[in-house]
Amino acid sequence: MAVDVDYGDARCEETNGGLWPVFAGLYLVVFAFFILLVSLSVLDHTKSAAVADSLKATFADDRAVARSPHDDGLLDAGASALTELGGALKSLLPVARVERSRTGDVLRVSVPSTEFFADGYASVRQTQTALLDRIVAALASPPKGVRLEATLTLSGLAPGAAGPGLNGGSPGQRLGRDRAGAFARALISQGARPETLAVGLGDGADGTVELQFRAVVERAADGGEGDGVAEE
């Protein structure tokens, strides 16, 4: 004959008493995991500075920045140079999407990556030589007192099914780095100053090459206003 025994209270006490060590253990495991991640991470100062500059350029409120009339005049000249460059690039590459910032000192040109690179290859197409020449001419001959800087960002490269490779990153990421390097070398070989160029990889999925040009007031080493000597 079966006898029903009520173990409800005892079971509740045992359950409540046995779960908190489990939760505490899980918490310590997760905590230790993040400590391990921090200890293995290495800060890349160059990339950190590039990210900070990019965030400032994208989200800065120019209305809150006090500028002298002299700076305003120089930036107006730089904005005019960027407007001319945007029109030239649009005429050379009609599929390009050209946008200007509200203040005019930033120009963004988005182009499908297939216009610059053949599928699976890192070298820049020879058909884009005229476009590269026009970019180099703008960077090499900015208005007096102004420096034009160019940032190339490639996005939409497939990460690849092979996973992380021996040389760092997936096959798609390595191809992106090779393309970015090839683009920069092509500009430098045609006369662009290396200090005016920056390259990077984006996380977009639309397979684009974005060229961002920015007009910056040059400062003399002694803190005076632009005389053609960039402050390092």
Image (cartoon, helix red, strand yellow):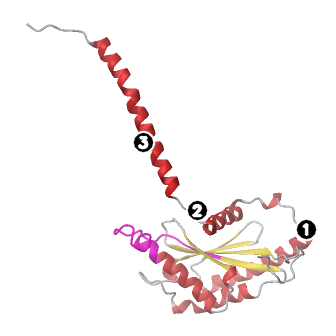
Task: Report, in whole angstroms, how far the alpha carbon at label 3 lies from the one at label 2.
Answer: 24 Å
Question: What amino acid is found at the position of numbered circle 1 in the picture?
Answer: Ser
Disc 2 to disc 1: CB gap under 8 Å: no
Question: What amino acid is found at the position of numbered circle 2 in the picture?
Answer: Leu
Residue 85 in magenta? Answer: no
Residue at the spot 63% in from the left edge and 88% down from the top edge: 188
**Mark 1 or 3, closer to the camera:** 3
Residue 63 falls in image quadrant = bottom right
Disc 3 to disc 2: CB gap under 8 Å: no
- Residue position for label 1: 68
Residue at the spot 45% in from the left edge and 48% down from the top edge: 33
- List the single residue furthest toward the left: 1
> What is the quadrant of the C terminus in the image?
bottom right
Residue at the spot 35% in from the left edge and 25% down from the top edge: 18
> What is the quadrant of the N terminus in the image?
top left
Q: Give the range drawn in magenta.
A: 151-175
Name the main secondary structure of what is drawn in magenta: loop
In terms of sequence position, does the residue under pointer 2 or pointer 1 come before the other? 2
Residue at the spot 32% in from the left edge and 12% down from the top edge: 9
Residue 192 falls in image quadrant = bottom right
**Mark 2 or 1, closer to the camera:** 2
Question: What amino acid is found at the position of numbered circle 3 in the picture?
Answer: Val
Task: Report, in whole angstroms, how far the alpha carbon at label 2 lies from the one at label 1.
Answer: 36 Å
Image spot of residue 141 (x, y percent): 76, 88
- Residue position for label 2: 43
Residue closest to the eye, 121 or 79: 121
Residue 81 is left or right of residue 39, and the answer is right
Q: Could you classify mark 3 by the number of other residues whose Cα lies within 10 Å: few (under 14), some (14-19), or many (20 or more)?
A: few
Residue 227 is left or right of residue 171, and the answer is right
Which numbered circle lies on residue 29? 3
| SS of the residue under disc 2 | loop
| SS of the residue under disc 1 | loop
